[in-house]
């Protein structure tokens, strides 16, 4: 099994907070983006790869390829930041046998159909349901934008939340 | 006349334009800023930026983003496959001033070439500069 040092839900994928803060804090050397749509979008892949720091390898895969790849043994000391845009993709990786015990809620911005969970995180009903199912399966879900902030456990907010 | 759109994390774009106007004078039409707030999604940012690109579809546009690999860069970059404009990432006040001074007389490509040429002069180690003058 390859080593995931941070599993993060963030609809911005690779961006300032990841590159300048999380990569350094976690000493990551690989970013894995799991996103079926991006996997088909060569232009945006080029854009993301061009901007990544030179010492970080960027892997972009669809869900099934990522589940197989993560399950492989690794002898090269990879330290992986796993990024998904939505909770459902993270949940599906767990269902596919990837042992993720802790999920960082880092960026789910306001858009149509979503309502606010806290100051900076918004989610629609399907996304809330997915987060709740992960909680029920004893996955720790914490909100934290950048490493210098204190992580906030999302259990109470999610248990009380219904976006109606 | 080339349009300029500045896109940043937080209020930098707006503040930078205000600061530039202290030096270059008040800018009229064709200069705009988009400031990404922490709670906004990339899709939302994309809609706002597309609004400007559509509005300016018949004229030249230069987009300046604050940081390579940041969300403004990612969102503006993703629109480069759809719209025709120039995009420089890593804007500072010196570069913005250069762009504002050129926009009357240059197209977007000339402006972006110029910005890349003058970029090293916009960042200076003043200690080294003084030492060289000794």
Image: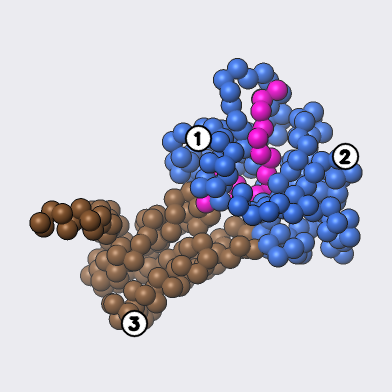
Chain B tint in image: brown
Foreground: disc 3 or disc 1: 1
Residue at the farthest left position:
B134
Q: Which residue is mark 1?
A: A56
- C-beta proximity under 8 Å, tags 3 and 2: no
- Chain on which label 2 sits: A
Q: Is residue B133 above or below residue A57?
A: below
Q: Position of residue B48 (x, y in %)?
A: 55, 67
Q: Please, what secondary structure does the residue beneath circle 1 have?
A: loop
User: Quick one: A89 or B30, which is closer to the camera?
Assistant: A89
Identify the residue under disc 3. Answer: B26
Mark 3 chain: B
Q: CA distance from mark 3 to mark 1?
A: 42 Å
A35 up-or-down from B1: above or below: above
Magenta residues, start to end: A1-16
Residue B99 counted in the magenta span: no
Looking at the image, residue A43 sits to the left or right of residue B132; the answer is right
């Amino acid at each position: 099994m390859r080593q995931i040092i941070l599993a993060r839900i963030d609809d911005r994928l690779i961006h300032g907070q990841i590159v300048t803060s999380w990569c350094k804090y976690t000493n990551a050397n690989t970013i894995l983006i799991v996103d079926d749509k991006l996997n088909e979008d060569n232009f945006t892949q080029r854009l993301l790869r061009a901007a990544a720091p030179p010492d970080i390898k960027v892997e972009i895969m669809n869900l099934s390829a990522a589940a197989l790849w993560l399950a492989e043994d690794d002898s090269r000391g990879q330290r992986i930041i796993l990024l998904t845009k939505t909770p459902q993709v993270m949940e599906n990786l767990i269902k596919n046998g990837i042992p993720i015990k802790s999920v960082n809620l880092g960026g789910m911005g306001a858009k149509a159909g979503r309502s606010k969970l806290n100051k900076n995180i918004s989610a629609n009903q399907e996304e809330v349901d997915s987060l709740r199912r992960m909680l029920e399966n004893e996955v720790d879900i914490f909100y934290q934008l950048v490493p210098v902030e204190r992580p906030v456990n999302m259990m109470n907010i999610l248990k009380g939340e219904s976006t109606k | 006349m080339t349009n300029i759109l500045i896109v940043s994390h937080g209020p930098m774009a707006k503040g930078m334009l205000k600061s530039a106007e202290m030096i270059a004078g008040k800018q009229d039409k064709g200069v705009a800023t988009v400031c990404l707030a922490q709670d906004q999604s990339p899709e939302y940012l994309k809609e706002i930026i597309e609004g400007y690109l559509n509005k300016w579809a018949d004229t030249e546009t230069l987009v300046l983003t604050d940081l390579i690999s940041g969300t403004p860069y990612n969102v503006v970059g993703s629109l480069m496959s759809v719209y025709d404009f120039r995009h420089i990432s890593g804007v500072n006040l010196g570069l913005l001033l250069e762009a504002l001074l050129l926009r009357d007389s240059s197209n977007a490509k000339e402006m972006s070439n110029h910005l890349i040429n003058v970029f090293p002069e916009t960042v200076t180690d003043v200690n080294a500069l003084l030492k060289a003058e000794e």
